[in-house]
Image (cartoon, rainbow, N blue to C red):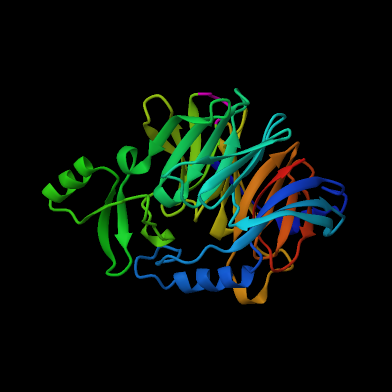
């Protein structure tokens, strides 16, 4: 496979890109400085896994409506404030967003919530391109995925990494392997094999970031095959394709760094390699890596570190959330141009949809 590396800083700056766009975004916290401090400290983890090693109190964030100017967000309105909203999705019937361990759905004048004992630190939502009533949910805190039918408000499919991919996690307290389980049978089997095991009770337990096995922090429906979903594995640094019927998986794009956001589009694939500051775009038998390093506006305390939170396709452009520059970066690959739309420095923007 041929790989081409392109630095966005070498593209032409075009302040018309994105101007006038209206978006709805989730802001995990209005105290980004605290998140940065935790992330830098987590790099000292004995396991080498980034992320917190103990339970922390959820932050208060918000769902925000905003419009893009030429260089910055020129208007915004906080629609609601709630605990750590992350996932957000919409189609012509529904608008959905998450708040820690629940999903809030709006359909016209109706508002309802989806709750499940296995919902924890919900990171991503995606509506099916084949059935507008189907919503995909990534419950990152317990390494599992769910699909819900919003007509019945009931799950129609689930996938637990502990049973279908990997249940091998790390006990941060002693930097030792620990195996996660959700059923007594699975727990007893692990113990009989001489393994250090942990039986999770979702009603009163939590898994900090560094103690999760797969840490599925984003998921989306394949736009090529209605029987497939695409997920990113934060700790392993790759995206995988999961067959909904067999629940088996295979590697999608590998050698990533703490990835967020993976898309299997009609003719190409797009994955964000978050902490390496790259966007991987694959089509046919070639890849283009768009490199964000060298762009202006990075907060000085982040040094050489990069953090591209998520990226979504929009027409012939790609729009990314650059957390270390507190900006949306809009790339036009065909014309080799870009624009940088800044937002307030204290916002930890997690995800967004274009209205």
Magenta residues span 222-226
Kindly identify the residue that appears in the image at 43 percent across and 28 percent down: 244
290 w.r.t. 29: above or below: above
Kindly identify the residue that appears in the image at 76 percent across and 40 percent down: 334
The answer to whether residue 349 is seen in the rendering is no
Tell me where residue 207 appears, x and y as whole percent.
39, 57
- 6 lies left or right of 240: right
Tell me where residue 315 appears, x and y as whole percent.
75, 36
Kindly identify the residue that appears in the image at 39 percent across and 57 percent down: 206
Residue at the outermost bottom position: 301
The answer to whether residue 293 is seen in the rendering is yes
- 92 lies left or right of 5: right
Q: Quadrant of the C terminus?
A: top right
Tell me where residue 261 appears, x and y as whole percent.
57, 46
Total label count?
0
Tell me where residue 268 appears, x and y as whole percent.
61, 33
Residue 287 falls inside the magenta stretch: no
Depth check: 11 or 30 in front? 30
155 w.r.t. 303: above or below: above
Q: State whether the magenta stretch is mostly helix, strand or loop.
A: loop
Q: Quadrant of residue 307?
A: bottom right
Depth check: 288 or 271 in front? 271
Depth check: 346 or 111 in front? 111
């Amino acid at each position: 496979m041929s790989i081409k590396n392109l630095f966005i800083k070498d593209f032409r700056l075009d302040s018309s890109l994105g101007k006038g766009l209206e978006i709805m975004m989730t802001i995990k916290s209005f105290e980004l400085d605290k998140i940065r401090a935790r992330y830098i400290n987590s790099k000292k983890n004995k396991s080498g896994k980034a992320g917190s090693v103990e339970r922390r109190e959820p932050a208060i964030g918000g769902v925000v409506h905003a419009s893009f100017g030429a260089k910055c967000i020129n208007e915004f309105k906080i629609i609601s404030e709630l605990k750590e909203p992350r996932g957000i999705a919409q189609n012509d019937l529904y608008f959905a967003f998450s708040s820690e361990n629940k999903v809030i759905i709006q359909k016209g004048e109706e508002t309802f919530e989806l709750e499940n004992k296995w919902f924890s630190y919900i990171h991503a939502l995606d509506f099916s391109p084949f059935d507008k009533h189907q919503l995909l949910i990534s419950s990152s805190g317990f390494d599992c995925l769910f699909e819900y039918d919003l007509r019945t408000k009931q799950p129609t499919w689930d996938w637990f990494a502990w049973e279908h991919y990997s249940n091998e996690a790390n006990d941060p307290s002693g930097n030792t392997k620990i195996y996660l389980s959700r059923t007594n049978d699975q727990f007893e089997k692990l113990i009989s094999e001489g393994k250090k095991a942990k039986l999770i009770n979702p009603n009163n337990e939590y898994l900090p970031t560094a103690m999760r096995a797969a840490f599925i922090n984003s998921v989306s429906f394949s736009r090529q095959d209605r029987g497939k979903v695409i997920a990113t594995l934060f700790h392993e640094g790759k995206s995988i394709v999961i067959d909904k019927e067999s629940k088996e998986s295979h590697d999608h794009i590998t050698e990533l760094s703490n990835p967020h956001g993976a898309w299997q589009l009609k003719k190409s694939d797009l994955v964000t390699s978050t902490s390496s500051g790259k966007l991987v775009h694959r089509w046919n038998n070639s890849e283009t890596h768009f490199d964000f390093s060298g762009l202006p506006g990075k907060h000085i305390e982040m040094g050489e570190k990069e953090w591209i939170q998520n990226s979504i396709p929009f027409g012939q452009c790609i729009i990314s959330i650059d957390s270390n520059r507190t900006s949306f970066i809009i790339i036009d690959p065909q014309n080799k141009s870009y624009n940088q739309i800044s937002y307030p420095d204290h916002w930890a923007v997690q995800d967004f949809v274009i209205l």
